[in-house]
Amino acid sequence: MAGRLARGLEKANPLVFTLVAGLAGFSAYFCMYAFRRPFAAATFGAVRGWPFALDYKIALVIAQAAGYAVSKLIGVKVIAEIRPARRAVAILGLIGTAWLALVAFAVTPAPWNVAALFFNGLPLGMIWGLVFGYMEGRRVSEVLGAVLCASFILSSGVVKSVGAWMMQVVHVTPFWMPAATGALFFPLLFASVWVLGQLPAPSARDEAERVRRAPMSGEERGAFLRAYAPGIVLLVLAYVLLTAFRDFRDNFATEIWTALGYGKAAGVFSASELPVAAISLVALGAVMVVRDNRRALMVIQGIVFAGFLLLGGATLAFQAHLLSPLAWMILSGAGLYMGYTPFNAMLFDRLVAFSGRVANAGFLIYVADASGYIGSVTLLLWRNFGGVRLDWLQFFTLSAYATSLAGAALTALAALYFHSKGRGEVRGAVRLGAPVAVTSR
C-alpha cells in the first residue's frame, strides 16, 4: 500500500498532490501542538512550596521555552544535515519523548515538576524543520507552507480549548491535563507522519525553478550566511520581536482573555484563531503565482511589513474604542501572523531559490528560531523581574506597539538590502560556496 501511494503521488495532478501533502503536514504539526501548548490553558494559581519570586506559570513557560530554544540551536545543524529517509522516525521519536516528559510533569510533585517542561520543549523544537523538509523546494511550496503555518495558528487555540474542556468537563487535574490531551492525538499523528513518508522528492521541474535542496555542511551554512549577512541579521531581529510577542500572546491567552471579559468561554481560544488563519495565510499562499524569486522575496517582505502595521493599527483602534475586544484580538492576531508565518516557510524558501545555491531553508529557519526563543525568554524575565507595574492587558498592549514600530523598520531595511543585492544576481543552481551565476528568478 505504501508503495502504491508513493507511486500515485509521484504521477498525481499537482492539485491532488498539494491536497495530500498539505493535509499530512498540517495534521502532523497540529498534533505536535497537542504535546506542547495545552498546559497554557491552566492558570495553576498559587502552588504550595514554590520558593521563588518568579510566578509559577511563568516558570513553566520559561522552562519549556528554554528547552525549545536549545532545541532550535541544535536544529541549526541537525535539520540542515538530516537525510530525508530519517525524518519520519525522528518526528515520532521526538514527540513520544515529549509526551513522556508531560507524564513526568504530572507524577512529579509541584513545584519540582518545572524541569519536566524543559524536557518537553527540548525535543519538540525539532519538529517544524523535519515536517517542513517535506514541503520545501517545490513549485507549490507557498501553498504547502501556508497550510503548514495554518496548523500552528489554529492548533494552539484548539488544543487549549481541548485542555480547558478536559479540566471543566472531564475533570482532569491541571497537572495531568497536558499528558491526557496529547494522548488523544497519537492516532492522527501516526497516520499523518506515515503519509509524509510516502511523499516523492521534488521533481526536476521543481528543482529548475526553486533550486535543488540538499543537506548542508557547516562550511556551506557559514558561506551562505556570510553571503547575505546584513539582510539575514535584519530579518532575524524582526523575527525575534515577533516570536517574543507571539509566545507571550500564546502562553498567557487565558489571562489576556480574562482581562477582556472572556474568562469563562473555553471555545474563545479556537474561535478567535479561525479568522486569524484565514486573513493571514490567503495572501501568503497566493505568492505561489509569482514565479520570479527576487520579486517574490520582495512581495513576502511587503506582507511582513503590512503585518507589523496591522498589529499596531488594530491596537490603536482598540484603544480608541473603534474595535471590540474580540475584533481587536482577531485583527492584531492576523497582523502578528502575517509577519510571523513567512519566516517559518516561504520567506527563507524563496531566499534559497533567489540565491541560486544548492541548500535548504531549514537551517535558516532554525537560525531565526533559536534567536527568537531567546527573545521570548528575555521578555518573560523582564515582565517578572524588570519592575514592570502593568497588568497582563496593559503589558500586551505596550508590547504590540513596540513590536509593530520596531519590526516595520527592520523589515523595510531588510527589503532595501535584498532589493539592492538582487541587482547583481543571475540565474543558475550551483554548489554552495561556488560563484553564483543566476538571474533574479
Image (cartoon, rainbow, N blue to C red):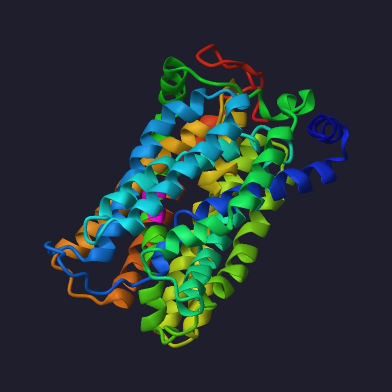
The image quarter containing residue 83 is top right
Point 17% across, 62% down: residue: 54
Nearer the observer, 289 or 23: 23
Q: Position of residue 256 (x, y in %)?
A: 38, 76
Q: Position of residue 293 (x, y in %)?
A: 65, 35
- Asked if residue 124 shows in the view, the reply is yes
Q: Residue furthest top?
A: 434
Check residue 29 for magenta coloring: no
| Quarter of the figure that contains the N terminus | top right
Placement of 290 over or under 107, stated as above or below: above
Q: Residue furthest front?
A: 107
Placement of 213 over or under 315, stated as above or below: above
Direction from residue 429 to residue 363 in the image, left or right: left
The image quarter containing residue 18 is top right
Stretch in magenta = 239-243
| Quarter of the figure that contains the C terminus | top right
